[in-house]
Structure formats: structure tokens, C-alpha cells
Amino acid sequence: MPTSLYQDDLHRNLLLEDASDEGLAVQSNHHVIVHGDQAMLLDPGGHKSFERIHFDIQSLSPGIRLRYLFLSHQDPDILAATNSWLMVSQAEALISTLWLRFLPHFGLDTDFESRIIPLPDQGTWLDLGGAPLVALPAHFLHACGNFQLYDPRAKILYSGDLGASFGMDYRVVSSFSAHVPLMEGFHRRYMASNRALRAWAQMIRHLDIEIIAPQHGAAFVGKEMCQRFITWCENLTCGCDLMTDLFTIPTPTHQS
Ligand code: FE
């Protein structure tokens, strides 16, 4: 059953149950925004998720049309099943212009290439059946071409891998300090630099945010909790800030 993050008479924001969280597969959240009869699916996932997520979307209500796939970046847990989604819908897939020529290597039929819409580095406003949404630049957090999506009606920021956490059994963060160890290691290694995080925080503080919903793990709910997360990001050293010691040639293990 989908979890509702926001609902009014015309607009719904739903979190679909993950379908690939087994074995080595990383736990992933799949979000849907429905406005009127149009829907956007964010970070649809790979082949293991496709059947379940497709079923869930078909079950939402009859007549809902999948208008957009929002692909925050190029990782397989985001877009490996893009071709299947384009086969079963008339949706357009939105992705950074940097990844346009790489996506076909996931088995994209040439017939569908015209439905891949490149997002420019500076981001863009989108229209979902009359509801404005904005694709925000979040480059280097973690991919070099990386977008987040803000829904001003629901006041939800879909933050992709930023805010990802692993190993908890809850869906909403209740204690920020207890949650930090579940996201810190990932952010220190995957996020490119504190400079990128500070630029992101400066941009994001202009928005009215009630929920920050990452693609993995628990969500930050309430203005205060969202602000705590933004401040944590702003002060985090990560990626290139920490990597210099790692660039050494490994000690040989073979006999010469
Ligand atoms: Fe990723």
C-alpha cells in the first residue's frame, strides 16, 4: 500500500513500497506525484522493482496517465528499467543532459529516444497537468549531473541520494542525532565536496519545505527537522575534502 505524504482535492504525493530490497540490492524509495489525471514517477528503479511499481501505479485509480519519469541521476537503481517504463506508457523521461548519451546503454530502444528530455544544468520548471514543479540543480550531490525535484504545492523536496540512510526500520526521522550515524558514512564517501553542499544549502533555504524525501531510507518531516538536515549538510566535510590520503598505490600482494 502506498504511503501518503500529502493530499488535497487535486494533488497527491505517494511513497510506494520498495520492491527490490533483497540480497545485495540497495533499499530504494519510489515516489509518485499525482495531479488530476497526470502522474510523475521519481527515480523508478531497476528491473527488480519494475513489475511491482507498475502494478502500484496502475492500482492508484483508473485513468491516471504517467506523464513524466524524473531521473535524478544515472545510477542503475534510478534508471535501469527506463525502457520498460517507456514501453508501457507515453511518459517522457527527464534526465541531466550529461547522461543523455549514456542512457541508451541500459537498452533503450531508438524509437523511444525522442521521449528522453534533457535537463539543462541550471534546472527548469515543469508542468504536471497544471501543477508547477521545479527541477533543481544538485550537481556533485552525488553525480556530476544531478537534479532534485521540489513540489511547491506539497512543500516536498525530493532530494535523491542526498539524505539517504541505511539500516533503520522507520520511515520518518524522529531523532536527528540518532539518525546521523545511519547516513554519515554514505555522505562522506558519495557526496563530492562541502563546497557543493554549501551551494546547495544556500539555494534550498529559499524554499518553503515541510518534507525532505530521499531516495533511500527515512524522510525528514517538519520545517525544523528539514532545517537541521540542511545545516548538517552545510557543515559536512566529504568526498574530495577527505580523499587525498586514498590516492596511494596499493602494496603488492604477489611475489616478484
Ligand atoms: Fe546514486
Image (cartoon, grey):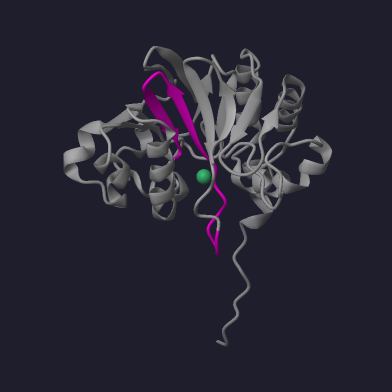
* Residue 69 located left or right of residue 208: left
Towards the viewer: 251 or 164: 164
Which residue shows up at 29% across the image and 50% down it? Answer: 105
Q: Is residue 149 visible?
A: no
Q: Is residue 165 left or right of residue 74?
A: right
At 44% from the left edge and 25% from the top edge, which residue is drawn?
A: 34
30 within the magenta span: yes
Q: Determine the residue located farthest toward the bottom in the rendered image.
A: 255
Which region is colored magenta?
Answer: 22-43
Counting the numbered discs, the total is 0
Quarter residue 7 falls in: top right
From the top left corner, tell me how far across and down residue 91 is, in percent.
30, 31
Is residue 129 or residue 23 the one in the foreground?
129
Relative to 84, does residue 254 appear above or below in the rendering?
Answer: below
Which quarter shows the N terminus? top right
Q: Residue at x 79, y 35 (%)?
A: 174
Whether residue 42 is visible to the viewer of this picture, yes or no, is yes
Is 39 in the magenta?
yes
Residue at the extreme left of the image, as rendered: 111
Residue 170 image point, x, y percent: 71, 44
Question: Which residue sits at x=38%, y=43%?
Answer: 54
Tell me where residue 55 sits by quadrant: top left
Residue 83 horizontal/vertical position (percent): 29, 45
